Image (tube, rainbow, N blue to C red):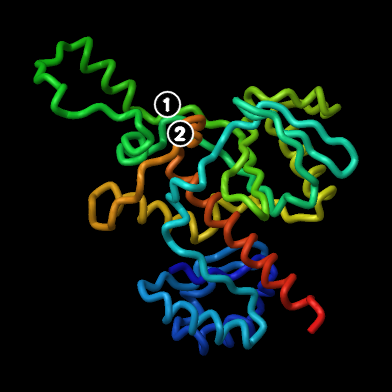
């Protein structure tokens, strides 16, 4: 279980001292784990009861904390699907996905996660569980030629990864995620004119966030959550953690990125839980 501290954490010296007393972690470690303005991992605990007790003690001291199951990072029931086009009409959004078009209210948006995805960054586990893997029984032994070795080197080099600006739309009531790929999305249809696809994506994301009154998360590179999910992905691939169920068909629409995708899923769920907590606290007794 992941005990996460929210972006509204003030991050002053006194706050870190209070947090240190409640968690048993030294302030130096906490400053590396949790920072103001972004989600951060306080502790990863195996026992759910321990995680809930820690979260309750932090909530009692008014820290913005939620508990998210670690399985969320690689949950096959949280597929990331391509958003081909988007229409904004007042308080309604029309989402054009690969196989269908749907209308949703703007209020259905929970948060937006903006970052950079990389084609080719998926692990062998992710590729195989998505149904695209091939049994090793079909492989044959070969003695590669010099030209084949060069192809292997080029395919394995960092230059073979294609990075692109992406934004994930998370919703309150469903767990699937709609992704805008800046390389192919038609921003001009929404009247967004910018010098680059990445800049156009930022403009659109800010517009949606303002309309829906939600937060845009841009901390995938800096948050301690990313470090954890990367380590978890390696553990899953090595078999040291229990395997997850195969991905659904919808998950095949997006090539996996084992850095950004798990981070986006965890942050989306954290924002969903936090929104529910705030709604419950504001509800009349």
Q: Which residue is disc 2 drawn over? A: 249
Q: In this view, does 33 lie above or below 151?
A: below
Q: Residue at x 31, y 35 (%)?
A: 128
- How far apart in space, not on screen, are marks 2 and 1 (Cα)? 29 Å
The residue sitting at 50% across, 45% down in the picture is: 261
Q: Which of marks 2 and 1 is in front?
A: 2
Can residue 75 be seen here? The reply is: yes
Q: In which quarter of the image is residue 11?
A: bottom right
Q: In which quarter of the image is residue 186?
A: top right
Q: Could you tell me which residue is drawn at 62 percent across and 82 percent down?
A: 59
Relative image position of residue 241 (x, y in whole percent)? 28, 57
Total residue callouts: 2
Q: Do the residues labelled 2 and 1 touch (CB within 8 Å)?
A: no
Q: Which mark is residue 159?
A: 1
Quarter of the image with the C terminus in it: bottom right
Disc 1, SS: helix
In front here: 59 or 230?
A: 59
Residue 67, image x, y percentages: 52, 70
Circle 1 packing at 10 Å, graded few (<14), some (14-19), many (20+), is few
In the shown orientation, is residue 21 left or right of residue 171? left
* Side (left or right) of 160 relative to 62: left
Q: Residue furthest right?
A: 90
Q: Which residue is drawn at 51% across and 89% down?
A: 21
């Amino acid at each position: 279980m992941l005990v996460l501290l929210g972006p509204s954490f003030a991050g002053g010296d006194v706050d870190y001292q209070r947090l240190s007393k409640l968690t048993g972690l030294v302030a130096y470690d906490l400053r590396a784990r949790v920072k103001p303005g972004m989600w951060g991992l306080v502790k990863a605990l195996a026992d759910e009861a321990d995680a809930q007790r820690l979260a309750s003690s932090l909530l009692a001291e008014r820290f913005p904390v939620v508990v998210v199951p670690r399985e969320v990072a690689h949950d096959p029931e949280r597929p990331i699907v391509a958003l081909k086009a988007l229409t904004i009409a007042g308080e309604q959004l029309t989402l054009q996905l690969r196989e269908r078009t749907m209308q949703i209210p703007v209020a259905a948006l929970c948060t937006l996660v903006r970052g950079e995805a990389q084609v080719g960054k998926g692990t062998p586990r992710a590729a195989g569980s998505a149904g695209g893997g091939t049994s090793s029984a079909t492989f044959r032994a070969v003695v590669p030629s010099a030209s084949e070795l060069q192809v292997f080197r080029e395919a394995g080099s960092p230059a073979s990864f294609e990075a692109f600006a992406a934004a994930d739309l998370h919703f309150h009531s469903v767990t699937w995620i709609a992704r805008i790929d800046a390389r192919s999305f038609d921003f001009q249809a929404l009247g967004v004119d910018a010098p680059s696809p990445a800049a156009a994506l930022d403009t659109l994301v800010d517009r949606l966030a303002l309309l829906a009154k939600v937060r845009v998360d841009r901390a995938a590179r800096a948050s301690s959550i990313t470090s954890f999910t990367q380590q978890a992905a390696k553990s899953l691939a090595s078999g040291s953690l229990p395997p997850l169920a195969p991905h659904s068909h919808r998950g095949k629409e997006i090539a996996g990125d084992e850095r950004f995708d798990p981070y986006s899923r965890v942050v989306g769920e954290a924002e969903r839980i936090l929104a529910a907590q705030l709604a419950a606290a504001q509800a009349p007794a």
